[in-house]
Image (cartoon, helix red, strand yellow):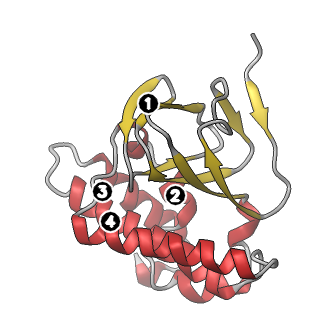
Amino acid sequence: MKMLKFKQFDALKIEELNENDFALQTHNQNYYELAFVYTGSGTHLLNKTNTSYQSNDLFIISQEDTHSFIPKTSTRIIVIKFTEAYFQNKLYKTFQGNMDITPESILNNKSLKETKLEFDAHIKTILRKNIDSILLYRKNNKNIISSPIIFCQILSVFGIINETMDKMFQNSEDNIYGKEKITAYIHQHIYEPEKI
């Protein structure tokens, strides 16, 4: 059977999915996804690895990944889907100096494919408030692609992911994430020797 491949041409889409919407066979796509489990529990299959999910979990899916959600209880997932074009604007360039790693490098990080992000309780609250802010804005505004408010909320989610990854992997034996982060930093600043 041929693998199902979803395609998106808009730079950004935000969708709310219920278990009937994502009861699909394993698939891949030509865009990135941040999938926030708003309610429910079940199993997320990512690249042939099963990971249990519950409310307030966040999954990062890149273009190379294959995945599906298998709900055990009634599930609602907020999916932020975007293409590479979404971060190729002037607003992102002004924020780039404040992040030591790019959203693209987080999305393609192999460490995140092998482990589930473990958020502290207060970080789960902040993450959920970010998602609620995105949903509220989207409900009242149609043009989310060019919105600086949505953009900053999404960057905030990446900041949460970055800090959580730092904390999770700082004490691991081989610290693959740390090595990937150094490589990404060098790649990002290769033409700025004063920063290396």
Q: CA distance from mark 2 to mark 1?
A: 32 Å
- Three-letter residue code for mark 2: Ser
Of the pair 16 and 57, the residue shown nearer to us: 16
Above or below residue 56? Residue 188 is below
Of the pair 96 and 123, the residue shown nearer to us: 123
SS for tag 4? helix
Which dot, 2 or 4, sits closer to the camera? 4
Q: Quadrant of the C terminus?
A: bottom left
Q: Do the residues under discs 2 and 3 have CB atoms within 8 angstroms?
A: no
- Three-letter residue code for mark 1: Lys
Which dot, 2 or 1, sits closer to the camera? 1
Q: Residue at x 57, y 32 (%)?
A: 67
Residue 155 image position (x, y, % from top left): 53, 75
Earlier-in-chain disc, 4 versus 1: 1
Residue beneath disc 1: 72
Earlier-in-chain disc, 2 versus 1: 1
Q: Does the rendering let one see residue 108?
A: no
Residue beneath disc 3: 178
Q: Residue at x 73, y 82 (%)?
A: 140
Q: Quadrant of residue 167 in the image?
A: bottom left
Earlier-in-chain disc, 2 versus 4: 2
Q: CA distance from mark 1 to mark 3?
A: 34 Å
Residue 153 image position (x, y, % from top left): 54, 78
Earlier-in-chain disc, 1 versus 3: 1
Which dot, 1 or 3, sits closer to the camera? 1
Residue 48 image position (x, y, % from top left): 48, 22
- Three-letter residue code for mark 4: Lys
The reply, left or right, for residue 184 in relation to residue 182 is right
Residue beneath disc 4: 124
The reply, left or right, for residue 62 in relation to residue 51 is right
The reply, left or right, for residue 13 in relation to residue 61 is right
Residue beneath disc 2: 105
